[in-house]
Amino acid sequence: MIVRTEDVVRRSALSAEVVDVDPQETAEWLESLEAVLRIEGPERARFLLDALLGRARAAGIDGPSSIHTAYVNTVPKDQELPYPGNAAGRALERKIKSLVRWNAMAMVARANKTTNVGGHIATFASAATLYEVGFNHFFRGRTGHDHGDVIYFQGHASPGMYARAFLEGRLTETQLKNFRQELQPGGGLSSYPHPWLMPNFWQFPTVSMGLGPLMAIYQARFARYVEARGLADTAGSHVWAFIGDGECDEPETLGCIGVAAREKLDNLIFVINCNLQRLDGPVRGNGKIIQELEGTFRGAGWNVVKCIWGSDWDELLARDTSGALARRMMEVPDGEYQEYAYAAKKGKPELIRDKFFNTPELKALVADKTDDYLAGLKRGGHDPVKVFNAYRAALNHRGAPSVVLLKTVKGYGTSAEASNTAHQEKKVEFSLTAQERALAEAEALELKQAQELKGLRTFRDRFELPLSDPDLKKYKFYRPADDAPEMKYLHERRRALGGYQPARNTEFVPCQPPNPESFARTLQGTPAGKGQSTTLAWVTLMQHLMRDPNVGRLVVPIVPDEGQTFGLPPLYNQFGIYSLDGQRYVPVDKGTLTEYKEKPDGQIFQEGINEAGSMATFIAAGTAYSTFRVNTIPFYVYYSMFGFQRVGDLIWAAADSRCRGFLMGATAGRTTLNGEGLQHEDGHSHLAMLAVPTCRAYDPAWGYEMATVIEEGINRMFVRGEDLFYYLTIYNESYDMPAMPEGVRDGILKGLYPFKTVTPEGATHTVQLLGSGVILREVLRAQEILGSRYRVASTVYSATSYEELRRDAIECERLSRLHPDQPRKVPYVEQMLGTDTYVPVIASSDYMRAVPEQVASYLNNRLLALGTDGFGRSETRANLRRFFEIDAEHVTVAALHALAERGQLERAVVRQAIRDLGIDPERSAPWTV
C-alpha cells in the first residue's frame, strides 16, 4: 500500500496524544479508506467520512477538529492535471509573463525617476504567476450576452495589469510613461483601480484595503439574485477577488465570509497572495498566516485550497515516507521562511540547509542536493502547474465559496526580494562587489547608477528579456511585433476566454421612465388629521413604484434589520425577502398583512445588522447597469446616523464605481428620533455627503418633495444614464402632508422654492425664513409668531438641498471668475432671495449650522444659520429643539435680532421677545455641553 506523506501527517494530526489499542483494526480502516480513494476518488471518501462523523455526533461522540490540514498542497501530485497546452505554449507564457514583469517595473521606476509620484513593484512581482495563469486559462471576458467574470484586482498590483494591457495593445506607451500623471498630454494611468478615472478599464476600486473582498462577496450574491429573479443570466459568471495576506487584518476582508458560505456562493473565489509580508514587516512572523486563514475560512464553511510548495518539492515529499519533512514545514514560523527567501537572494543558500533541514533525517533527505538547488526550491505561487491546479480545484468546487491560499515571495525577482522594505521599493538596485565598483569607476559611473544597472542586468538575465544595456538604462518599454509567436498566443488565449480583462462595460441601455401614476398618491398629500412621516410616505411610494410596469421589477430595496422601524413589513408580504432557501419554516405572523415572507425570487434584501454588507449590496445593484446590463435601482434605507460615519469608505467606493441609486437616511435629524440620544441622532450626514462629488443630497420636508426628487433621480440615472447617486433624509415624525403646489418642481430639484408668504397688516419689516426637513414646520410656526406678535412680514422657503444650491453657486462663481468679460452669472440662491442687504435670511435645520452656511457667502453674508451643533440627548422633540435653539421661538428671536443688527428694530424689542418666548439667554451653548 502506498501512503502519501500528506495522509500520514493528516492522520497523525487526528490521532495526536491517543494510544492505538488495536493497530490491526486501525490498519484495516486506513486500508479501506485508501481503497476508496484509489477506486472511487476523493469525493466519495469525503462523503463517507462526513457520514461517519455524522453518525458519531448522533451517538454523542465529539468529532475531531478539521479546521486545519497539513502544511502541504491541497491538490496532491497524483491528482494534478497536466498544464494546458504543450511545452511551446508554456515557454510563450513565460515570455509574456517576463515582459509584463519588465514593463510593470519599468513603468514604476520611470515615474519615480523623474517625478517621485510613487508606485509599487513588490506586490505584482510576487503575484505575476497568479495573474498570468488566470489571464491565460481562467478569467472569462465579456462576449455577446455572456457577462464574463467579475475580477477585483489587488490595488497594489495595478502596474501588472497596465503592463499586460500594453502588450495587448489596449494601452499606449504614452499612457505608461504617464503612470500616476493623469493630467499630462496623451493621458495617463491612475495609481490604482479607479473606474471613475478609467471608466473603460477598471470595474471596481479595491486599494482601500478590505473593500474588494467585502464587495466581491455581495457581488457574487447579487449575481445569484438577478438570476433568481429572471433579470439577467449570470450562471456562467464567477467573481474573483485578489487579496494580500496582510490585507486580511482589515475587518472588512473577513467580516462577511460567513455570508458567502451561508449563501453557498460557489461562484466566488478568493485568491489570497500569501507572500508573508505586509507593508513593513512579516504578517505573522511568529505564526503561519496560511494556517490561520485556513482555519478561519474552513470554520466559516468555505472550501480551502492551499498551494504552498512548487513542483521541485514533489520529489522530496515523495522520499519523505516518515512525514519528517511535512512536520518541519508545519513547525517553521513565517518569519523564518522570510529569512530563508532573503538568504537565498543574498547569496547565503547554506543557511537553508543548516536551519531548515536541521535534523539527521532531514539532512539525509537532501544529502544529494546542492545548496543552490535548495535555495532555488520554489514556493507554490510561483509555479504555474501548481497555481493552475489550485484554481481548477476552486473553480470546480460546488456548494460553497472557495479560497485559494498561495505562498509566494514578496518582491520576487527584484533587488528587495523578501526584505521588509520590499513594499516601498521603487527601483531595482543591487550592491556592488569591489571588482564591480572598480569597473564602475573606470567607466565613470556613479555608485547609484552602477548599482541600478547591475540590478537591471540581473533582472533581465533572470527573466531572459531581449533588452540591451542602453535599453535597460532608459527603462525602455518592450512590446514584440504583432506577428511574434508570444503576441499571437496572448491574443488567442484572450479570444478563447471571451475578451480582455480588466475591462468595464460602458454600453448603457436605458430603461423606460417610471409611470407618473406611481407618484400620484404621494404628490396628493394626506387628508387633514391623517398625517404621516416622510419615512412612511416613502414606504407608500415604494409600494406603488415596485408595481410600476416600467421599473417595478428593477427596484431593489435593501434594509439592515430595521424594517419594523421604517414601516417596511407590508413590502415583505407583497414582494418577498430574497432567500436562497426560500422559507422552510412557518412565520409567526403567517396570514397577516405584514407577514415575514422569504422567497427564492424575493425582491427585498434583509441584510441583518450589517451596514457594510448592505452598502456592498447597494454598490452591486447600483453598478449592475454595467456589470450585468440590467438597470437595477437600489434603495438602501438605514439610520442616517449610521451612514457616512460608519461606511464612508464604501460610499466613496460607490462614487468611484459610478454607482447609481438612492441612499435613504431614515430616522433622520438630531432632534427628531425620540429618546435615542447621542449614539443615534444625526446632525452631520449632509456635511459628510457634501464630500462625495457624485452624490446629490436632499432634505425633503414633504412627501411630494421626496417623490419629485426620486422620480427625477430615476430618470437621470437609469433613463439618461448619468453617473450619480442620491442621498435623501427621511424622518419618523408624523404630520399632515400638503399636496404639491403648482410650479414648484424646478425649485425642489434646484434646492429652494417659496412655500408661504405672510404679510400682516401694518408690517414695516421683512425677513426671509429657510427651513428644511421636519424643521420647516418650526419655521412656519415662527412665521406665525413674527406676523401676529411683531408685525414682521416673511416668506418661508423650503430648502430641499443646500448642497445643490452650493453646487450651482460655485459653478456660477467659477464661470464669472474665468470669463471676466462676460456678464456675471447669478447663482440660483441669489436669484431666489435677492441681494437686498436690508432683508435678513434666517435658516434653521435639524443639522449643523455648517449645512445652511454653505450658501452664506453668496447672500452678502446676510444669512444667520441655526443648527444642531453638539452631541445629541435623549429627550422629547420639543425639548431637544429648544436645547439646540432651532425651534420656532429661537427662529423668531434670530429674525428680530437680524433686523436689530441692521438698525431696523430696537434692541429692546429683542430683549423683550427673549423673555416673552421663554428663552434662557444665560444657558450654556449646546455645543459646549
Image (cartoon, rainbow, N blue to C red):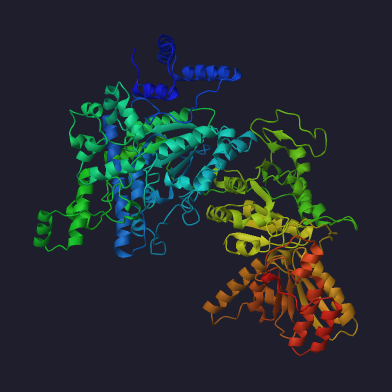
Number of numbered tags placed on the structure image: 0
Q: Is residue 386 above or below residue 649?
A: above
Is residue 905 among what the camera can see? Answer: no
Quadrant in the picture for residue 837: bottom right
Tell me the quadrant of the picture where the C terminus can be found: bottom right
Of 648 and 240, the residue lying toward us: 648
In the rendered image, the vertical position of residue 9 relative to residue 498, given as above or below: above
Query: In front here: 515 or 418?
Result: 418
Image height of 495 relative to 613, above or below:
above
- Residue depicted at 48% across the width and 17% down the height: 44
Return the residue nearer the eye: 153 or 504.
153
Query: Residue 347: where, in percent of width, then height?
Result: 19, 45
Q: Residue at x 32, y 24 (%)?
A: 323
Relative horizontal placement of residue 685, taking residue 282 as reference (left or right): right
Residue 47, x across and y down, in percent: 51, 18
Where residue 614 appears, as percent x and y from the top left, is 62, 46
Residue 770 falls in image quadrant: bottom right
Left or right: residue 891 compared with residue 163: right
Q: The N terminus appears in which quarter of the rendering?
A: top left
Q: Is residue 928 visible?
A: yes
Seen from the viewer's position, the closer of residues 547 and 819 is 547
Which corner quadrant of the image does residue 230 belong to? top right
Residue 401, position as x, y percentages in the image: 52, 33
